[in-house]
Amino acid sequence: MLVAGDIDESLLGANGARILCYIDEPEVVLLAEQRHVTRAEVAVDMGLAVPGPKLMVVGSAPAAINRMINRRQHEPMSDVCVLAAPSGFASVIQMKERLLDSDLTSIIVRGKKGGVGLTAALTNAILRHIAQNPQG
C-alpha cells in the first residue's frame, strides 16, 4: 500500500491503466489467515487474476516475489513484468536473485538496496517514460 500511495496517477494517461493494491483488502486478510500464508501471496494471486498486461510492483514483500516465481513454474506469465526493489529483509537478496534467474520479465534492484521510496520512484520513472514515448 505504501508504494501505491506514492505512484503519480496522472502519469497513467487515458489508456485504461490503473493502480491496484490488494494488500489491505479485507478479503486478502481473511484468505491469508485461512490459508496460513502472507497477505502478499494472496494479493499477488488477486493481481495476477486481473486480465491484461501488468507491472507487478514489489517494494517490501519478498514473499510476493516468491509467489510469482512459483506461479510462473506452473503457468504462462508473458503479460507480466515484475519490478522488485524490496530492501533488507532476511531473504530479500535470495528472492531477487531467484527472480533474476527465472524467465519472468523483471526489473530488479539487486542486493540489500531498495525500499518503498525507490520502488515508487522507479515506477513513476517508467510511467513517465511511457507517457512521453507512447509509440514505445
Image: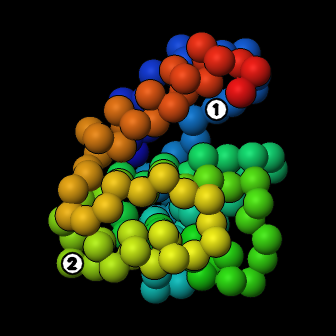
Mark yes or no: residue 22 visible.
no
Image spot of residue 2 (x, y percent): 33, 42
Image spot of residue 76 (x, y percent): 79, 71
SS at circle 1: loop
Q: Nearer the viewer, mark 1 or mark 2?
A: 2
Amino acid carrying mark 1 in the image: Arg
Left or right, 21 with reference to 74: left
**Count of marks, rendered view:** 2
| Residue beneath the point at 51% across and 77% down | 101
Q: Residues within 10 Å of mark 2 (few under 14, many from 20)?
A: few
Q: CA distance from mark 1 to mark 2?
A: 31 Å
Image spot of residue 30 (x, y percent): 51, 69
**Image quadrant in which you'd find residue 120:** top left
Left or right, 128 with reference to 60: right
| Residue beneath the point at 60% across and 47% down | 55
Quarter of the picture holding the C terminus: top right
Q: Earlier in the sequence, mark 1 or mark 2?
A: 1
Q: Which residue is mark 1?
A: 18
Left or right, 130 with reference to 122: right
Q: Which residue is mark 2?
A: 90
Foreground residue, 85 or 134?
A: 134
Label annotation for residue 52: none
Mark yes or no: residue 122 visible.
yes
Image spot of residue 69 (x, y percent): 57, 76
| Residue beneath the point at 67% across and 47% down | 54
